Image (cartoon, rainbow, N blue to C red):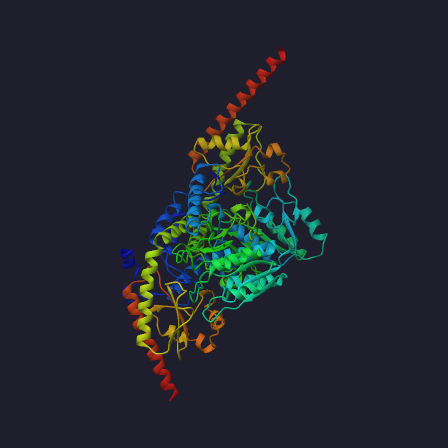
Amino acid sequence: MDYNATVPVRPEAAAAVAQALAVTGNASSVHGFGRAARRLIEAAREAVAALVGAASAQVVFTSGGSEANNLALAGCGRARLLVSAGEHDSVLRAAPTAERIALRSDGRVDLAALEVLLASDSRPALVSVMLANNETGVIQPLAEVAELARRHGALLHCDAVQAAGKMQIDMTALGIDLLSLSAHKLGGPQGVGALVLSDRVALAPLIRGGGQERRRRAGTENLPGIAGFGTAARIAADALATFAELALLRDELETRLARIASDMTIFSGAAPRLANTSCFTMPGTPAETQVMALDLAGIAVSAGAACSSGKLEPSQVLRAMGASETEAGQAIRVSLGWQSVAADIEAFAAAWGQLYERRAAARYAERQDEQQRAAL
Amino acid sequence: MTRQNDKAAAPAGRPIYLDYQATTPTDPRVVEAMLPYFNEHFGNPHSIEHAFGHDAEAAVEQARAEVAAPIGAEPREIVFTSGATESNNLAIKGAARFHKARKPHVVATRTEHKCVLESCARLEREGIRVTYLPVEPSGLIDLGRLAAVVTEETAVVSVMAVNNEIGVIQPLAEIGALCRERGAYFHSDAAQAVGKIPIDVKDMAIDLLSISGHKLYGPKGIGALYVRRRPRVRLEPLIDGGGQERGLRSGTLPTPLCVGLGVACALAACEMGGEAARLEGLRDRLLAALTAGLDGVALNGDPRRRIPGNLNLSFAGIDAEALIAALPEVALSTGSACSSASVEPSYVLRALGLSEERAGSSLRIGLGRFTSEAEVERAARSLIDAVKRLRAAGARAAE
């Protein structure tokens, strides 16, 4: 139940990868081997473009979402960067000096604060706001953000790594200028992603060399990865309606957990969210304890973004929403996917419920001890 | 090996692939090792909290050790990247930017891969001085010339181990010793060298070394950068984020691709000796057949200090593009695939001092693991016929 960290590769996408692995040829070579590779790449480009309402010429393939975000920020040509406080580390760390757009307590960006920032400085800016948050699943009001950006002559970058394949996206209608995607978050292979550009952007490359990707990203194309990405994008687009049904499972889980622990917090629970994501606390129990107990029960969840989970620190996103350090340190994330079933919810609620009761009993015993000691 | 060669060799009627410097077929044994990781072994290697993540992490770490071993490195000195282009960008821009204040100078040879030269051009726009070192007519650098340009202000010297067009091998150990003495990092683009010639980062005093997966029968989309730990090499990252790869390269590691690169390196290391001898035999046969069947065939680049799987030949009076067009049954190239679309003659050949005409008459022929004797013989016959046809047509047109 950790689909927001990485998704099992769709069998069809794995098959496309395996097929492409058997294709010899550098897509830049002009001979038949090269042209065969080129055809596979261009078909994938169309599928990826279609997933986000773009034309294939707008798609630049990268090695993943982190590279796409870094490329967007470094290559957009804007010196002034405004990024939301809830962004992924690949945005926050790529732009350490960027101005931060505050989040409201429900996890959505504070539009009034964004407007004040935009009006405070007349230099042309880039605004970076993700479409859906990887930890809470909250969906940002991108159309409104785009409107503000447009009015102030700013470009808009949107990290859609978590959102793509989980909700309908039309980047042209939303007014997004640069959009980041990652294949492995939507059932494609790891090691491939894309930055999709509107025609308002003249991108400066981050990785220079050969003339691949219309001189916007050098390096021999990752043919199998791109082929798998295309297939996964096509399937994800077809499965959007099914994906929305995961909200039933998710809501059922939250109802059960709230029944077990009435004092729990569900982050962004009242805001529009991705159908598959839930981020909540077990009061009094550190996230690591929960993750380990669930792991013993055979359930994989995470205490936040997987990248930084080597070093467990309370989530920056939850802190930016106003959660205390203690509360943020007790939050775990459940994210469902195409293989999730009702039995997973049952198993989760049982394991989590047991831990909750054990912890409550332990706390009760501790209090008794203390009282006894005080009485002596 | 024999059984596989038979399997992968082109049957009559299918084009013969002789463009192994552009890319190599992924070895079936590599594919076999990778496929499980696209299916049951999924997991984000960074999700170390749970079991799925553990499996992926163990596989990635094994791969890291397999990449490190053949070049004499420690596993933790290997940084996975998306390929040699990224590795080269990270090494050169990363080192130069980190040391810009005290060492605002970079040296690269004129025959480096485009991605090295483009990185240098970018650095020049950032105020860093770049010296483009010429090469001798053999394609090799002159150590005296190098010694004259490397100073204590030099942050990094970039000299490729094996050239991608002419296959010549640079004197790595001598360059390494010189750089170490002058306090400059030695970076080598070894995309065409790893698995083909012995490389030892300690003996050769190499500080940064770029590796490509798809040039050594591994997958595309993966590469590595060796970054020395002692004495420590400091770089500014190109991609920031989750802090993976010691903070030098953020982004979720692609487990199957890392596994594929690891297996490819391990295979290349254990088969290198025998394979080099086999390819040398095939190459010599091909060259002998062509020089016996045709006049005006000349080898470009040093005849001895070169990898066995490459020939770069000029055919007097022939336009190489026309020759390729006349030879649909053999996949060949005029030079780097990255600049295939450009009509300019190779800058590498021009840097050897070749005339525009001779450079324009040159072909790159790449032999590799799945090239069979029968293919070499067929390719030689086709090439001889095509050159004769084109020369005859040229003579008729002249009359």
- The image position of residue B150, as x and y in percent, is 57, 61
- The image position of residue A76, as x and y in percent, is 60, 58
- The correct choice, above or below, for A16 with respect to B341 in the image is above
Question: Residue at the right extreme?
Answer: A120
Q: In terms of depth relative to the viewer, which is nearer, A249 or A321? A: A321
- The image position of residue A199, as x and y in percent, is 57, 62
Quadrant (top left, top right, bottom left, bottom right) of the C terminus of chain B = bottom left
Quadrant (top left, top right, bottom left, bottom right) of the N terminus of chain B = bottom left
Q: Locate residue B9: give its quadrant.
A: bottom left
Q: In terms of depth relative to the viewer, which is nearer, B72 or B356? A: B72
Q: In terms of depth relative to the viewer, which is nearer, A298 or B238? A: B238
- Left or right for B165, reference A203: left
Q: Locate residue A35: give its quadrant.
A: bottom left
- Left or right for A137, reference B30: right
| Image point (44%, 34%), residue name | A344
| Image point (39%, 58%), residue name | B196
- The correct choice, above or below, for A269 with respect to A74 in the image is above
| Image point (45%, 40%), residue name | B53
Question: Residue at the bottom extreme?
Answer: B399
- The correct choice, above or below, for A200 with respect to B248 in the image is below
